[in-house]
Image: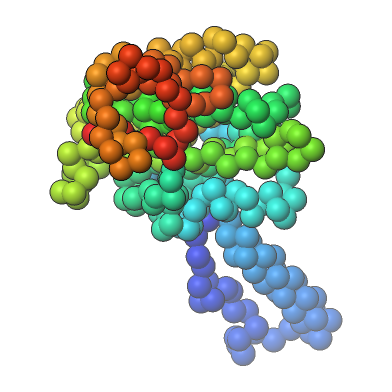
Amino acid sequence: MHLLLSYPISQSHYPSFLASRELQFPPVLQTILNFSFYSLRIIIALLIHLNIILLQNNTFFGHSNAQNIIVLAETASTNDYLKQLLSNFTPLEEYTAIMTMKQTAGKGQRGTTWLDQPGESLTASFILFPQKLTPQKQFYLTIISSLAVYDIVATHTSGQTNIKWPNDIMIGNKKVGGILIENKISHSRIKHAIIGIGLNVFQSQFPSEISFKTTSLLKENPSLQTTILSLVTEIQTKLKYYNEMLLKEQYDELLAHYNQLLFRRDLDALFTVKGNTIKARIVQVGKDGLLEVECKQKKIKYDLKDITYQL
């Protein structure tokens, strides 16, 4: 099991053998001790610089058979942290997750900020190394990540769960989670994909300005029995399952499954297009990732920046 936790360590945590005047050693032994001590300090300093130490069991994480998870006490963005590891050529296995107890600058779609409640939200990023996927098919990464999170939410709650195009997870008319994917493209191939996932888990209340459109697993299931870490490992398992379908080029099956779960599909709903409200019905999402809606008996395709749901 590869499970790591990061937290800041103050200078006072260092041992201080050399400060003691009560211990007297022969010169040779003293030299060896000095060398060993300073070597130890270098190692500890490197660990602090990397901000990683072994995780201790606690009530936040509980027990798990997790694989390849790095846990941070705090970071600005798990996506950015993972990108930094990759830029430093840190070897990472596929599906490795970076999770944090507190994220201070999480990102969402359209440049929005993901609001993170320490100890109550799942905030994690996962690394994938697509083997065959071209940039033209990158929307399938959105599909498999959305399906993975959908499955986890549906497992732990009983409400109507859907995927709001392109990758928000809804319970009823309220958002419970969101996904931000950042791809690295090289030589007409996707070199790696960082899948950032935010999921409301243990919140019992939200600020009044968002409470009407936001929920959590606990609010939907007051008897919820899980841990943040367990949910991360479940997402890893689901990502692997759907990514294997992708590797087998089961594109049609994945897209059909995604469309079956679309929020407000085949229902008359209100949208904002170029500042104007329109009444339209979602038909489907195409292979190109564009949303196709029917408005006034005409079918129109929209990109993410061109249309907004009215909730």
Asked if one can make out residue 103 in the rendered structure from this viewpoint, the answer is yes
Q: Residue at x 62, y 40 (%)?
A: 183
Asked if one can make out residue 151 in the rendered structure from this viewpoint, the answer is no
Foreground: 165 or 8?
A: 165
Residue 41 spot, x, y in % from top left = 67, 72
Q: Relative to residue 30, is residue 227 depicted above or below?
A: above
For residue 133, what is the image quadrant?
top right
Residue 271 spot, x, y in % from top left = 29, 32
Foreground: 1 or 297?
A: 297
Residue 67 spot, x, y in % from top left = 58, 33
Q: Residue at x 53, y 14 (%)?
A: 254
Where's the C terminus, which quadrant? top left
Q: Residue at x 56, y 28 (%)?
A: 139
Q: Relative to residue 240, is residue 191 depicted above or below?
A: below
**Left or right relative to 22: residue 199:** left
Residue 17 spot, x, y in % from top left = 62, 79
Residue that sits furthest to the right in the current view: 28
**Left or right relative to 5: residue 133:** right
Residue that sits furthest to the bottom in the current view: 21
Q: Residue at x 57, y 53 (%)?
A: 81
